[in-house]
Amino acid sequence: MTIVDKLKEKLHLGGNSKSVASESPAVPPKSSASSNPAVPPKDASPVATKDSLPDLPETEVFDHEKVTVIFVLGGPGAGKGTQCENLVRDYGFKHLSAGDLLRAEQTREGSEYGDMIKQCIVEGQIVPMEVTVKLLENAMRDTLAKPPSVSSELSSAWEGGKGRFLIDGFPRKMDQAIKFDEAVCQSSFVLFIATTEEVMLERLLERGKTSGRSDDNEESIKKRFKTFEETSMPVVDYYRSKDKVVEASIDSSPPVQEVYQAVRAAIDPRLGVTAPQPVSGIPEPVAAVEPVHDEPAVLGKPL
Ligand SMILES: Nc1ncnc2c1ncn2[C@@H]1O[C@H](COP(=O)(O)OP(=O)(O)OP(=O)(O)O)[C@@H](O)[C@H]1O
Ligand SMILES: O=c1ccn([C@@H]2O[C@H](COP(=O)(O)O)[C@@H](O)[C@H]2O)c(=O)[nH]1
C-alpha cells in the first residue's frame, strides 16, 4: 500500500474513484519542513504537495441528467448561506457548503488536512482543490444514498437516482470549477449574489460576535475579500462567458426576504419551475407570478 493509499484510508476520502496516482510509487514531499506532508512551511502560501492529496476521478461521477448542481457564489458575507436555507425549504435542495465541509474536516479527529485547512481559512486562502472536490463528492454520494426528506410535491426531485444540490461557496478557483464539472458532475448554472464590501464587512463582524469562526475578524475578512476579487471573480466571469450565471448579479444589500424574491425570480426560469398554484387553482404564467415564500416550488422537467 502506498503512502497516498494509507492517507486516503485514514482520511475516509477514498470514494470509489479510479486511482491513477496511487499506482505510482509514492514520492515524499520535498518542500515541507513539517512532518505533516499537507502542512506548508510557515512563510509559504499554504499549498499541499500533490502526493499528499486525494486522487480525483477522471470522468463524471454523477450523471448531470439526473443530478442538478447549482453553484452559489458571492463575496464573503454576501448572504449565500442565508439564501440557500430558503431555497432548501421551498425547492427540496440539499445544501452543501464547501466552507462547512472544510471546517468539519479541519476538526475531524485524525485528519491529515486539519492544520492545512485551518491555516488556509484564517489566511483567506483556497484549500487545494483535491481536498474540497473530494469532500463534496463524498457528501453528494452520501446524500444520494440517503436522500433528504422533502414534501410530497418535491419528492420526484429525489427519485430514481435523481437529486438536486446547492453548492455554496464553491468553486472559488478556476481549477476547482474545471475539475468538478469534468469529474464530479457538470453544473447546471450559477447563482451569484453581491453587495458592497462595506455591507459584507459589517455583516461578518456582527456574525463574528457569535459564530466562533476563525476568519470572522477584520484581518481575515480583508484577506478573504482580496482572494475573492483576485481568484474567485474570474470563476464567475468564466461561467458568465458560458451564459451559466442566472443574472449579472443579484443585489444582496436589501433585507433577506427581498433578496430572496430576486433569487427566486432569477432561478425559476432556469429550473423550469411552474408557479405555485394560486388559491383559485388556475396556474399563472411564471413571469407574472410574485413568488409565494412559504410554498414549495413545483419543479418542472430536470435541467
Ligand atoms: N439580506 C441580508 N440583510 C441583512 N443581513 C443579512 C442578509 N443576508 C445575510 N445576512 C446576515 O449576514 C451574515 C452573513 O450571511 P451568510 O452567512 O448567509 O453569508 P455567506 O455569504 O454565506 O458568508 P460566508 O461566505 O462567509 O460563509 C449572517 O449573519 C446573516 O444573518
Ligand atoms: O471551495 C472552497 C471554499 C472555501 N474555502 C475556504 O474556506 C473559507 C471559508 O469559506 P466560506 O464559504 O466563507 O464558509 C474560505 O475563506 C477558504 O479559506 C476553500 O478553500 N475552498
Image: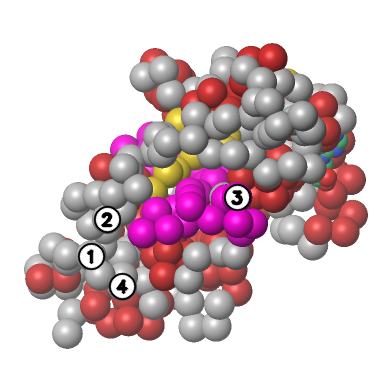
Residue under label 3: 153
Q: Position of residue 77 (x, y in %)?
A: 73, 39
Please tell me how crowded label 3 is: few (under 14), some (14-19), or many (20+) other residues with Cα within 10 Å. Answer: few
Q: Residues within 10 Å of mark 1 (few under 14, many from 20)?
A: some
The residue singled out by tag 1 in the image is 17
Q: Picture quarter containing residue 32?
A: bottom left
The residue that appears at 55% across and 83% down in the rendered structure is 109
Of label 1 and label 3, which has the lower sequence position?
1
Q: Secondary structure at mark 1?
A: loop
* Camera-nearest residue between 238 and 218: 238
In whole angstroms, how far apart are the C-alphas of marks 3 and 4?
35 Å
* Mark 1–mark 4 distance (CA, rounded to whole Å): 7 Å
Give the residue pinned by disc 4: 14
Mark positioned earlier in the residue sequence (3 or 2): 2
Query: What span is colored magenta in the figure?
Result: 150-179
Q: Quadrant of the N terminus?
A: bottom left
Q: Quadrant of residue 269?
A: top right
Disc 3 secondary structure class: helix
* Cβ atoms at labels 1 and 4 below 8 Å apart: yes
Residue indicated by mark 2: 61
- Please state which of the two labelled residues, at mark 3 or mark 2, is closer to the viewer: 3
Identify the residue shown where x is 82% and y is 27%.
Answer: 258
**Distance CA(mark 1)–CA(mark 2):** 8 Å
Q: Which mark is nearer the camera, 3 or 4?
A: 3
Amino acid type at image mark 1? Ser
